[in-house]
Image: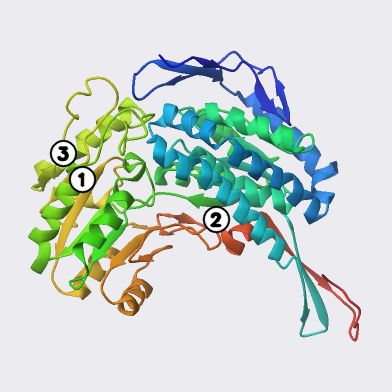
Amino acid sequence: MTELVEHGKLYIGGELTDPAGGGVIEVVSPHTEEVIGRVPHASRADVDRAVAAAREAFDHGPWPRMTLEERIEVVGRIKDAVAVRHEEIARSISSQNGSPYSWSILAQALGAMMVWDAAITVARDFPYEQRRSGVLGPILVRREPVGVVAAVVPWNVPQFTAAAKLGPALLAGCTVVLKPSPESPLDSYILAEIATAAGLPEGVLSILPADREVSEYLVGHPGVDKVSFTGSVAAGKRVMEVASRNLTRVTLELGGKSAAVILPDADVATAVAGIVPAAWMNNGQACVAQTRILAPRSRYDEIAEAFAAAAGALVVGDPLDPATQVGPLVAQRQRQRSLDYIKLGQDEGAKVLTGGGRPAGLDRGWYVEPTLFGAVDNSMRIAREEIFGPVICLLPYGEESEALRIADDSDFGLSGSVWTGDVEHGIDFARQVRTGTFNVNTFSLDMLGPFGGYKNSGLGREFGPEGFGEYLEHKMIHLPAGYEGPGGA
């Protein structure tokens, strides 16, 4: 039986302190359906305290006034500690959200370390000041920290998304109130320990586990200058609406329904080996998952057979078992959501090629078999709506132009891939798809390039200099005509 993890305090302004209210979040194992943890539920009063601490630290504290190298030194210690404690972090996350432990090691923990490291690389090379020749004389363009940041992260990749926001925000000189999901708050206490040991000054970071109501209060707080949110489209639209009341800047990383396009000249074995882990990654609970697989009609049966065999062979079970490839979904509601979509797909006329129910021998836990639908039309709801579970659609197409049209025929535009025997042709195909990230004969997410979506997949970017710039303001300083001094770094 998993040991119960309990925390009685909140991390506000760099210190563990008693919560203002008596609310409690119970963390339930998606594998055993038993309570495995309890933490305080942050209240509005706790948000007020955290924002006040962040405001004071930004307006009067040392953090924004340190040199970049001094901030890099502190953030570097955070990165190093995440690497040292990666197994502990991975186990904590897997126990909460069902992510397979082997995947958690690579993506949840070491992936977060890589995000911290990439942010340091970008910060070192970023042009904070630039001299330009203006129409009326020389100008100096500065980039300055935006201020107090509200960072709202989801349950599916909590440390990865936290690092994606905290890394650039802290390095830019901002202060942050981080709001973890109530499904996965336990790992945030590890992060709090790491941040304190790294030497973050007082007030720079607060961590407040809470539900949507308190999240809404945070993103609408007048003391917040910037909101960075990762989550569903519906929640993202609400965040934007609430933040707009104060004209608070927002970055939104939302959902996806990404297409993996297999061209007629592709090697099927290579495509299957690359797409299967990208489709069923993190139990299908990933915004970038390749959930629509497009196959040419001339090879459809061959491809369908290969994918059904590969999906059916995935090992389903205890997320803490290193052999597990697909674990349980995070909550009963998510399991029911996947089952409802499976029934809907059958009602719409699609055919279950493999999966479709609860895995044999797993009578407890929020499990759904890795499921592949064939005979899917892109107008079906299972092909248009984000399921966020292990349910994948295989769609046929005729000419390549039809494949491109189907790939783009979506309310989302977050990720995608093309699989072909001609890489140059694949690059040309990638240029035509309206999506924020795309892959040719591979699937990855590079932290030194911009990540984000078109259409309903979001607003703004994370990672790379583009994502770093989201935490900075532009300032133009006019210089006197004829001035030739140094004027900038």
Secondary-structure class at tag 1: helix
CA neighbours of label 3 inside 10 A, class few (<14), some (14 to 19), many (20+): some
Mark 3 lies on a secondary structure that is: loop
Residue at position x 19%, y 29% from top? 358
Residue 329 in sight from this viewpoint? yes
Query: Is residue 47 shown above or below 145?
Result: above
Tell me the distance, in whole angstroms, between the alpha carbons under discs 3 and 2.
35 Å
Q: Residue at x 34, y 24 (%)?
A: 31
Q: Residue at x 65, y 52 (%)?
A: 168
Between tags 3 and 1, which lies in front? Answer: 1
CA distance for labels 3 and 1: 8 Å
Amino acid type, callout 2 = Glu
The three-letter code of the residue at mark 1 reads: Ala
Q: Quadrant of the C terminus?
A: bottom right
Image position of 241 (left or right of 138): left
Q: State if disc 1 and disc 3 touch (CB < 8 Å).
A: yes
Quickly name the residue at label 1: 311
Q: Nearer the viewer, residue 476 or 154?
A: 154
| Disc number for residue 355 | 3
Circle 2: element type: loop
| Residue 245: x %, y % from top left | 60, 45
Q: Position of residue 485 (x, y in %)?
A: 91, 79
